[in-house]
C-alpha cells in the first residue's frame, strides 16, 4: 500500500467513525426528546431505517411506516418484477419521510408526488399499470392522539389492527408523463437554469421559468411575482 493510499484510507476511516458517532449522538438525543418504539419493534430493520432517515421516532413516522408497509403488502400480489412504484402524498408531515425511505419513491427520483391538501392520505401505485392502493388515516386513530402521551399513541399506531388505523381502498391512478430531468433551459428573464419540461408550451422559443412572469401568464391572470415560489 502506498503512502497516498494509506493516508486516504485513514481519512475515510476517520470520517466513518465521526459519522457513526454523530448518528449515535443524534439518535440518543432524539430518544430523550421523542417517543421510543415498543420493544417488539426496536429491532425491526425497516423501522430503524425510517428512524435514521427521519432523525427520530414519533407518531407521524409511525403513521408513515404503517402506511408504507401496508401499501407494499396490498400491491405485492399484483406487482411484477419489472414494475416500479409511484407515491402520492397529500401532506408534508413526518409520515412522508417513512414513505420515501421504505418505498424508494423520492422527490428527486421523479416517482414521488406531493399534493398540498393537508390530508393524512397516501397512495402507492404500480408503474406502468397504474394499479394503486390508497390509505387514509381513520378518524378513530385521530381520537387516540393523546397530547400528554405521544409515546402511547405512537405505539398504538404501530401495533393496532390495520383496519383500526386506516381506511384502505384499491384504485386506479393516471400516471404523469415522464419528465426529462436532464434537459435544462435558461430563463430569458432571470438568467437561471430550470427544467425545460416546466417551460410553458407557448414559451418554447423564449423560455421563462415558472417563477418569472410571461406575456401569456399576464394575459391569463396567473402571473407570479419574480422570486416567488
Image (cartoon, rainbow, N blue to C red):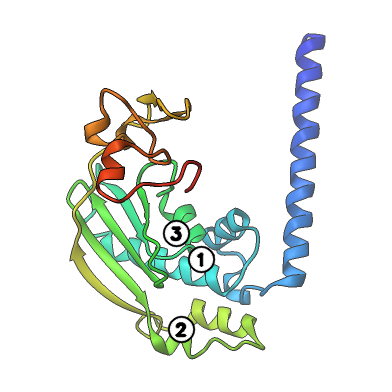
- Who is closer to the viewer here, 156 or 167? 167
Which residue corresponds to mark 1?
93
Q: Quadrant of residue 152?
A: bottom right
- Residue 34 image position (x, y, % from top left): 69, 72
How many circles with numbers are drawn on the protein?
A: 3
Which-is-in-front pick, marks 1 and 2?
A: 1
Identify which residue is drawn at 59% across, 58% down. Answer: 54
Q: Is residue 186 above or below residue 116?
A: above
In this rendering, would 224 be left or right of 49? left
- Residue 204 image position (x, y, % from top left): 25, 27
In space, the residues marked 3 and 1 are separated at their CA atoms by 11 Å
Q: Quadrant of residue 16?
A: top right
In this rendering, would 133 be left or right of 145? left
In space, the residues marked 2 and 3 are separated at their CA atoms by 19 Å
Which residue corresponds to mark 2?
160
On-image quarter of the N terminus: top right
- Residue 149 image position (x, y, % from top left): 65, 86
Which residue corresponds to mark 3?
99
* CB atoms of marks 1 and 2 within 8 Å: no
* CB atoms of marks 2 and 3 within 8 Å: no
> Dot 2, crowdedness within 10 Å: few (<14), some or many (≥20)?
few
Q: Is there any visible trace of residue 179 in the rendered image?
A: no
Q: Nearer the N terminus, badge 3 or badge 1?
A: 1
> Dot 3, crowdedness within 10 Å: few (<14), some or many (≥20)?
many
Q: Nearer the N terminus, badge 1 or badge 2?
A: 1
Q: Secondary structure at mark 1?
A: loop
In space, the residues marked 1 and 2 are separated at their CA atoms by 21 Å
Identify which residue is drawn at 80% across, 25% down. Answer: 10
Identify which residue is drawn at 53% across, 83% down. Answer: 156
In this rendering, would 74 be left or right of 161? left
Q: Is residue 191 above or below residue 56?
A: above
Amino acid at each position: 500500500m502506498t503512502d497516498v493510499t494509506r493516508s486516504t484510507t485513514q481519512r475515510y476511516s476517520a470520517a466513518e467513525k465521526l459519522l457513526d458517532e454523530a448518528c449515535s449522538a443524534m439518535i440518543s438525543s432524539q430518544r430523550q426528546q421523542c417517543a421510543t418504539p415498543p420493544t417488539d419493534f426496536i429491532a425491526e430493520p425497516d423501522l430503524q431505517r425510517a428512524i435514521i432517515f427521519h432523525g427520530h421516532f414519533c407518531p407521524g413516522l409511525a403513521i408513515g411506516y404503517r402506511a408504507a408497509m401496508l401499501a407494499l403488502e396490498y400491491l405485492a400480489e399484483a406487482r411484477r418484477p419489472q414494475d416500479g412504484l409511484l407515491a402520492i402524498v397529500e401532506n408534508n408531515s413526518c409520515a412522508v419521510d417513512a414513505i420515501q425511505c421504505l418505498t424508494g419513491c423520492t422527490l428527486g427520483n421523479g416517482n414521488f408526488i406531493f399534493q398540498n391538501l393537508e390530508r393524512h392520505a397516501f397512495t402507492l401505485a404500480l408503474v406502468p399499470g397504474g394499479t394503486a392502493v390508497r390509505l387514509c388515516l381513520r378518524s378513530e386513530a385521530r381520537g387516540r392522539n393523546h397530547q400528554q402521551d405521544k409515546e402511547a399513541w405512537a405505539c398504538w399506531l404501530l401495533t393496532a389492527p390495520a383496519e383500526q388505523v386506516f381506511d384502505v381502498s384499491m384504485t386506479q391512478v393516471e400516471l404523469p408523463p415522464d419528465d426529462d430531468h436532464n434537459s435544462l433551459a435558461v430563463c430569458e428573464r432571470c438568467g437561471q437554469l430550470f427544467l425545460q419540461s416546466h417551460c410553458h408550451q407557448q414559451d418554447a422559443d423564449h423560455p421563462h421559468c415558472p417563477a418569472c412572469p410571461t406575456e401569456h401568464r399576464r394575459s391569463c391572470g396567473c402571473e407570479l411575482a419574480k422570486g416567488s415560489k
